[in-house]
Image: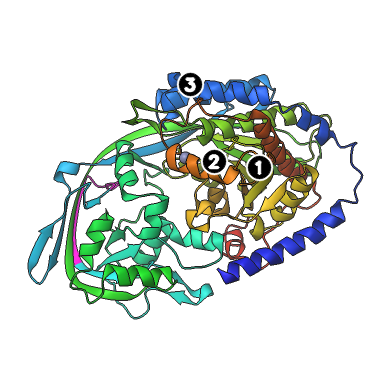
Amino acid sequence: MKNSRKQILLWLGALLLLAGATHAAPTGVDPADDAMALIRPEALRADIRFLADDLLEGRGTGTRGHLLAAKFVASQFEAMGLEPAGEKGTYFQNVPLRSYRPDEANTTLTLTRGGKPTNLVFRKDYYSLGDPVRAETNVEAPVVYAGFGVTAPEQSYDDYQGIDVKGKIVAVVLQAPNFETSLRAHFSSFEVKEAIAVAHGAIGMIGLADPVGEQVYSFQEQVRDLSFPSLRWLDAHQQPNDYFPELRGTVFLSMDAVEKFFDGSGHTATEVFAASKAGKPLSFPLNMTARIHEVTRLEDTQSPNVAASLPGSDPALRQEYVVYTAHADHLGIGDPVKGDKIYNGALDNASGTACLLEIARAFSRMNPRPRRSILFVAVTGEEAGLLGSDYFARYPTVPKGSMVANVNIDEDLLLWPLQDVVVYGAEHSSLGAVAQQAAGRLHLDISPDPQPEQVVFIRSDHYSFVKQGIPAIFTEAGVKSSDPAINAKEREAAWEKNIYHQPQDDMNQPFDFESGAKFARFNFLCGYLIAQAAERPAWNSGDYFGEHYGKKKGAQ
Ligand SMILES: [Zn+2]
């Protein structure tokens, strides 16, 4: 934690210097000011009201409700005079998907210690999401506990040091070491842990609940979300994304099951959690074998991304694109909560989609147009694992190297008068300076990540662009309120606890649309400044994500 704070202070210092330099430019004649004035609170209200209507049934990926939302967005793009930027001259890019659900009655998990087998109970002790390719898989092997399951040589960190997991099942805590906030988020991602486990020769995985994770996304909530099918996108060979055939079984244990899991291992769960909280968990063989038998129901489906472009005005720079994203999908229809089963997703993410539309409208009326071209993409499948954005970032409808930056909008938390923003990803590239400049112009503060344990950096669509080497930022409202009578921090915490991913995220909330418009203007300005700059954005030198993804893909 110390390290990350120091880094934030360092880059904030650098940004202040840069912001000081750019503030010398004359203001008041910038066409961006006129464009921003076109972003209206009433328009946001209208778009959110339509997208969050019960008629759209929560916009679940692959459902008719989401398709209605996608067509609505496309027709708005068309009305603005934006060019289709999907496939075959349309506004749509089809994303082929595999939907999969565990067959709970036929899936089993048996742990055997000292010759004594214990059968665990689905939903109570554990759950499995199923396998996106095989209708039936089996694995039986010794279990080794590998802490966070992280091997990160650049950070001189290795949970696999001193243990051998070849041909074994690896158990990991679903958290990450106390690296800098984005890096910590990156290494808490389960697909990253899977890739590392496979590289070490593992053949199965057991994800362990822990006290930190329970606060963020509890086992109970994970079990509740089994009512929504899991999804992956499919490539041209029908292979799902981030699939590791080497892993022949993966299950996730509840807190209660984890307590018993460590019985007789020489370490208690309490010891294990204390060590992981201190930043360096123990790693040791568990004196036990596990047998995982997964049965999965598979189904193929599809869902569209919606894409439109505004050609830039500069003959050279118009070959490059600033990409705005907002996910139009939400969870759909699920288990009822307080008598309501439609998960409307008004803030998550009808609000961001509405911002995307108003930002597009503002850009579309600019004269002169921005120098670079702007791409607006209402992605699908975000809630199912950033699928639409990942597909678009990998298989863009424009030349891959032409996307210079991504600005992502997810959850415009218009619940109090906006005073500050948190800009995830800012510390990794020159986009940090852009955000600082935009914030200064709109009299907004930029605040550091208030809750690193929420691992927000990997939880929305900008991360898909980061993984393709494209500098990206994702902005959220901070927790300051410009009205002293409203405690934004409390309101945000209550929203996370009672509304987030519940059917109650609907229009019956105390929305401040003026605040929402301010947030949209901030995002507009970030994209505009990127579009106008002489140089395309660049990763900071030596940055982890720039080194790992930026160079590999030749995006820079
Ligand atoms: Zn969400």
Q: Magenta stretch: give its range.
A: 129-141
Please give left or right for residue 387 compared with residue 32 in the image.
Answer: left
Q: Residue at x 70, y 67 (%)?
A: 10
- Which quadrant is home to the C terminus? bottom right
Question: Is 192 one of the magenta-colored residues?
Answer: no
Question: Is 131 one of the magenta-colored residues?
Answer: yes
Does residue 87 appear in this view?
Answer: no
Residue at the spot of label 1: 481
Please give left or right for residue 335 compared with residue 90 in the image.
Answer: left
Instruction: Tell me residue 92's x, y (percent).
Output: 53, 29
Please give left or right for residue 401 compared with residue 114 in the image.
Answer: right
- Checking the image for residue 53, the label placed there is 3
Q: Amino acid at mark 1?
A: Ser
- Which quadrant is home to the N terminus? bottom right
Q: Amino acid at mark 3?
A: Asp
Q: Quadrant of residue 515?
A: top right
Q: Earlier in the sequence, mark 1 or mark 2?
A: 1
Q: Residue at x 19, y 66 (%)?
A: 141
